[in-house]
Each structure stands twice: as structure tokens, then as C-alpha cells.
């Protein structure tokens, strides 16, 4: 009997001798997280059940990132509740404004997630960490409360879907385009409660930031998780993130063992030759409503957002800055650039990206989820359109129900900001 990488990780976190898809297990959790929207309910539920001590104060992260810096009194109260809980139970990984960032960029950056880990978070994009070879998935706030109490989570073993990518990526094409292309093929419910396993020669050459972007959006296809088998590139990322905490032999062994067996069973296998793939854009109001950018004509826009847990990393800002350098944002367009963490913010300053964005006519914001969920720092008015590097474009996602959001990679977003309409980067380079 063969196991997929997902099944291997889950088996290692339960007392069962063997597992099969569809079974329920009580799994030991390596790390869990909540934010300023989801953690308050988890905290109230855990304390309602008589919480005296959390299962492990070093295995919980609480990150106020959605409505921070606080946009109003209600959001300030939410954050205070989380802050007080962190102090009361001595939570080691509480990150305040000024030291925090968007949670799904911050935790890998700090080296808190590693290959083989089982991670749950009260946020649907917790699936991001599958890029490190972990099983990571979003859960409800009450599930998170249970983890606070016990360190365990009740899970159903998901079936796995394999996605094989071959070919060399064209210029301006990256992980965001691969996942949009995939979601367009299978639909927003095409991987419901499945583990989406991404592999193939294209993935092996894909930089870590692009791998994060792919796994981040597994949930947009209904996936329980996204995962990429760890390799030398993964280990280098973890080594740099963990510094002196990195255990070389331990993680080298992980790379050898954390890959799917040849006889592993999949519910389906999809193969994509992406050698001719061009940048993709998801049109309103679904991440699956995707077209190549060249097929989108004369769609004028009002706003561009470059950031989020999908595309707010330094390579994303570097790509946008390359296109915007020496150019001006269209006078009809608001450009908002949001680095995902403070470290990325500082690196952007060091590489003078901030100067490029501001001279182009954009604004450079402190790390926050902000506009991605229609929270703040870029709400759309009725009838307005935005190109965004975020992950969702549902009705009212970024503001008014009659606004529109188009999802793209950072290169397309930057080019569109210059043209004032959805554009291919080649149109401005």
C-alpha cells in the first residue's frame, strides 16, 4: 500500500497504524494560529470550556493583521481581546503591530513552519504552508478553541489530487498564473475537501514565493490543502528562516521521506503543459472565471492593489517595481502597494522600491490584509473596478456589491496601473 505525502504527514500525527481517505482521526497539532477576526471567538469558547492553561504556549501564533492598524473602535477591541489573552497565557508568538505582518507570510519568514508539520489555523488561507511540505489547513474558530485546550484537532483524511506541470514558464508568468489556470480548469469546487498535490518539472524549478502563492489559493478550488514535496530549495528557505535553530540532518531526512509513494492513490491526476501559458486574469466574480490577459480588451480600472498573503512578498514587489520604474500611474488609477511583513517593508526600502512606487504616483502602506477582505486601506465604491494580486474576487469582496475585482500577478497589476486598464506587461516595457 502506498501513501501520498499528505497521508504520510497525517499518519505521523495520529496513533493509528494505517489510514485511508475518508477516515476520521484525532491528530496532534504542531502549530496553530488565529488572527484579530477569528481568534476572539476561539478565545471566548476556550475560556467558556474552562481553559486554565493552553496546550503549549510556544505552538500558538496570534497575529492581528486583518483590520490593523486598527481601523475603528470595534477592531481595536478585537485586537485588545487577543492581546490580553496572549499576555494572560504567555503566548510566545503574539506579534503586535510594528513586529507583525500578514500571518501567512510572517510565520514561514520566522521559521515557525517546517516540512512535515501539521498546522491548523482559523483562516482559510492557512493552506499556504503546504509550500514547505507541511499539511496545513483552515479550521473554524471553535476548532481552534479545541486546539488551545488539547493540542489536537479532529480531521477527515482527504483524498488527494495530483497536478503535474511540465514546460518552462514564459516571461511574466509565475505561480499565481499556474494556480489561476488550474482553478479555471477544475472550478471553484473542483477540489472540494481534497489535498491538491502540485508536482512536475515546472514546480521543481519554481521559486519559493511562487510555491506559496500556489498553495495559498488551493482553497479557491475548494481544496482542503495544497502541498508541494520539500526539496533542496525548501530546505534552503527553512535554513535561512530558522538560522541557528535549523537541524540539517533532521530536515534532509524529511526531504527523503516526504514524497508520495509510487503506488499512492489519487482521486484524479491532471497534467498541464504550461510552456505557452501567458499571464492569467480572473474576472468577476469567481477565481475560476479566468482568461489570458491578451484576451481582455478595454477594461478600464480605478484601483490596483499589490500585496496580500498571496503576492505581497519581496519578489512580488521587485517584479512590480521593475515595471513601474521611471513610469507614472495613470491619473485615473489609485495604486496601493502593501508589503506582507515588516522585513519585506525594510527590504523594499533598501532596494529603493518605495521610492519607485511613490514617484510613480502610488502609496506604500504598512503591512496589513486591509483591502483584500474589504477591510480598509482601499475600499471600492459602487461601479469601481480593481486589479488586485489578492486571492478572491467574490461579490463585495473589496467593497461595494456593485464593484468588481480582477485577480492577477504583480506584473499584470503594475502594467495595468500604468495603462489605466487591464494590460500585459509587454505593453509598458
Image: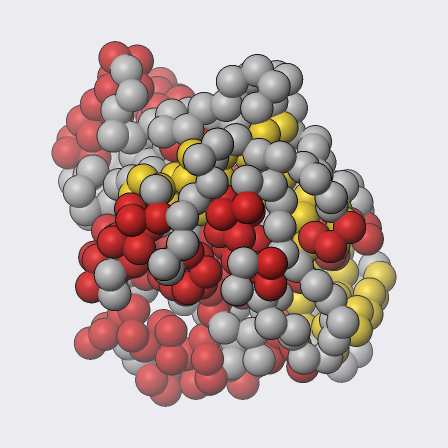
Residue 69, placed above or below residue 195: above
Question: For this view, does 70 lie left or right of residue 249?
Answer: left
Question: For this view, does 230 lie left or right of residue 29?
Answer: right
Question: For this view, does 159 lie left or right of residue 127?
Answer: right
Colouring chosen for the image of the structure = secondary structure
Examine the rendering and report whether any part of residue 32 can be seen: no
Residue 34, placed above or below residue 410: above
Q: Residue at horizontal 38%, vertical 80%? A: 236
Residue furthest to the top: 73
Q: Residue at horizontal 21%, vertical 58%? A: 349
Question: For this view, does 396 lie left or right of residue 54?
Answer: right
- The total number of labels drawn is 0
x, y (%) of residue 164?
A: 75, 72
Residue 319, placed above or below residue 216: below
Q: Front-most of 127 and 278? A: 278
From the image, which quarter does the N terminus lie in? bottom right
Q: Residue at horizontal 37%, vertical 60%? A: 325
Examine the rendering and report whether any part of residue 291 can be seen: yes
Amino acid at each position: 500500500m502506498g501513501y501520498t505525502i499528505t497521508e504520510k504527514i497525517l499518519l505521523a500525527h495520529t496513533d493509528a497504524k494505517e489510514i485511508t481517505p475518508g477516515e476520521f482521526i484525532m491528530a496532534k497539532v504542531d502549530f496553530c494560529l488565529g488572527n484579530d477576526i477569528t481568534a476572539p471567538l476561539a478565545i471566548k469558547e476556550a475560556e467558556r470550556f474552562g481553559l486554565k492553561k493552553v496546550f503549549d504556549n510556544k505552538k500558538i501564533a496570534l497575529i492581528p493583521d486583518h483590520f490593523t492598524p486598527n481601523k475603528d473602535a470595534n477592531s481595536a477591541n478585537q485586537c485588545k481581546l487577543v492581546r490580553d489573552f496572549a499576555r494572560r497565557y504567555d503566548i510566545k508568538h503574539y506579534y503586535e503591530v510594528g513586529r507583525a505582518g500578514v500571518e501567512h507570510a510572517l510565520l514561514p519568514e520566522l521559521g515557525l513552519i517546517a516540512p512535515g508539520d501539521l498546522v491548523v489555523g482559523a483562516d482559510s488561507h492557512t493552506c499556504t504552508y503546504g509550500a514547505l511540505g507541511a499539511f496545513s489547513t483552515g479550521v473554524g474558530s471553535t476548532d481552534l478553541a479545541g486546539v488551545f485546550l488539547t493540542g489536537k484537532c479532529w480531521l477527515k483524511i482527504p483524498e488527494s489530487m495530483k497536478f503535474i506541470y511540465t514546460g518552462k514558464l514564459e516571461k511574466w508568468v509565475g505561480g499565481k498564473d499556474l494556480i489561476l489556470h488550474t482553478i479555471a480548469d477544475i472550478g471553484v469546487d473542483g477540489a472540494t475537501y481534497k489535498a491538491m498535490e502540485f508536482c512536475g518539472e515546472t514546480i521543481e524549478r519554481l521559486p519559493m514565493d511562487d510555491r506559496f502563492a500556489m498553495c495559498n489559493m488551493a482553497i479557491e478550488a475548494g481544496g482542503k490543502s495544497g502541498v508541494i514535496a520539500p526539496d533542496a530549495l525548501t530546505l534552503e528557505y527553512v535554513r535561512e528562516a530558522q538560522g541557528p535553530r535549523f537541524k540539517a540532518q533532521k530536515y534532509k531526512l524529511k526531504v527523503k521521506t516526504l514524497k508520495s509513494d509510487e503506488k499512492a492513490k489519487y482521486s484524479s491526476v491532471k497534467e498541464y503543459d504550461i510552456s505557452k501559458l501567458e499571464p492569467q486574469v480572473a474576472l468577476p466574480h469567481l477565481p475560476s472565471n479566468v482568461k489570458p490577459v491578451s484576451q481582455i480588451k478595454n477594461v478600464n480600472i480605478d484601483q490596483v492593489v499589490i500585496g496580500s498573503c498571496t503576492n505581497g512578498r519581496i519578489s512580488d514587489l521587485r517584479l512590480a517595481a521593475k515595471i513601474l520604474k521611471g513610469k507614472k500611474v495613470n491619473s485615473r488609477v489609485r495604486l496601493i502597494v502593501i508589503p506582507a511583513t515588516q522585513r519585506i517593508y525594510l527590504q523594499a526600502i533598501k532596494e529603493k522600491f518605495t521610492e519607485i512606487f511613490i514617484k510613480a504616483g502610488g502609496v506604500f502602506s504598512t503591512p496589513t490584509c486591509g483591502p483584500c477582505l474589504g477591510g480598509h486601506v482601499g475600499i471600492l465604491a459602487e461601479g469601481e473596478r480593481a486589479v488586485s494580486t489578492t486571492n478572491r474576487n467574490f461579490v463585495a469582496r473589496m467593497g461595494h456589491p456593485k464593484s468588481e475585482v480582477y485577480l492577477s500577478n504583480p506584473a499584470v497589476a503594475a502594467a495595468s496601473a500604468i495603462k489605466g486598464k487591464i494590460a500585459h506587461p509587454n505593453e509598458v516595457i
